[in-house]
Image (cartoon, rainbow, N blue to C red):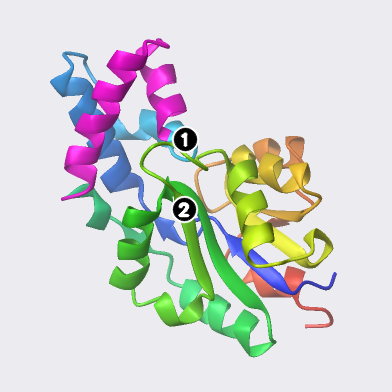
Amino acid sequence: MTNDAILFDLDGTLTDSKPGITRSLQYALSELGYTPPDADELSWYIGPPITETFSLLLKTSDEKLLAQAISLYCDRFSTIGLFENFLYPQIPQTLKTLRAYGYQTFVATSKPYVYTIRIIEHFGLSSLFDGVYGSELDGTRTVKGDLIEHILLTENLSPSTVVMIGDRKYDMIGAKQHQVTAIGVTYGYGTEEELKTHGADWIAHSPEDIPKLTIPNL
């Protein structure tokens, strides 16, 4: 396939953010008086918009309680959890390879932009992206389809020349809503079954697989 631009999810695709996210979720739940699940049980909640995550964990749609949970989560994540995070080792070279072949690369994450840009700068990846896109703190563009649409319009990209790379169903669903090719990665937090069920066109089992799927005749 031929692509001009490649959109990368952040958590579970560029970085392993499990420690920071799960510890911040546990902190918020504890502060609210709940007994938090173990970190491994919380892995499944990495990827959805944070409001959806807490709605599932707290089994509620009460807006006041959800807002309180998110505020507690952000208190810890913005100061500590942000950097309890690890870059997948093959990512820098993968990005360099794609850019060497002329592809534009963008970050496309439901995580708030104010956190995302700090993470990208922390890992020294700024020069490897043409743009960094995330959600707003008020919840705008936390739905991946809305975010992808925003990037397509802002960057004047044709969906037929764009590919979305992510590890959860939200990435696949968002891509398919806009006729964008979707690559699911299995080294993150979702399963191959989840990714294929929700529209993945290709599956990458490691970052090294990504250039092989996106660069013709590599």
In the image, what residue occupies the spot 51% across and 70% down? 131
**Lateral position of residue 167 relative to residue 15, left or right:** right
- Work out which quarter of the rendered image holds the C terminus and state it: bottom right
- Mark earlier in primary sequence (1, 2): 1
Q: Secondary structure at mark 2?
A: strand
User: Which amino acid does the dot numbered 2 rest on?
Assistant: Gly
Q: Which residue is mark 2?
A: 134
- Work out which quarter of the rendered image holds the N terminus and state it: bottom right
Number of numbered discs overlaid on the protein picture = 2
Residue 36: x percent and y percent?
Answer: 25, 22
User: Which amino acid does the dot numbered 1 rest on?
Assistant: Pro
Q: Is residue 186 above or below residue 52?
A: below
Q: Which mark is residue 128?
A: none
Give the image quarter of residue 139. top left
**Lateral position of residue 32 relative to residue 177, left or right:** left
Give the image quarter of residue 100. bottom right
> Is 63 part of what is drawn in magenta?
yes
Residue 173: x percent and y percent?
Answer: 70, 39
Closer-to-camera residue (7/27): 7
Q: Which residue is mark 1?
A: 49
Closer-to-camera residue (182/72): 72
Q: Secondary structure at mark 1?
A: loop
**Lateral position of residue 212 relative to residue 10, left or right:** right
In the image, what residue occupies the spot 20% across and 31% down? 72
For label 2, count other residues whose C-alpha is less than 10 Å away and answer few (under 14), some (14-19) or many (20+): many
Q: Is residue 73 above or below residue 55?
A: below
> Is 43 part of what is drawn in magenta?
no
Q: What residue range appears in magenta?
A: 50-79
Give the image quarter of residue 119. bottom left
Are circles 1 and 2 on residues that touch, CB within 8 Å? Answer: no
Q: Is residue 80 above or below residue 208?
A: above
In the image, what residue occupies the spot 68% across and 59% down? 152
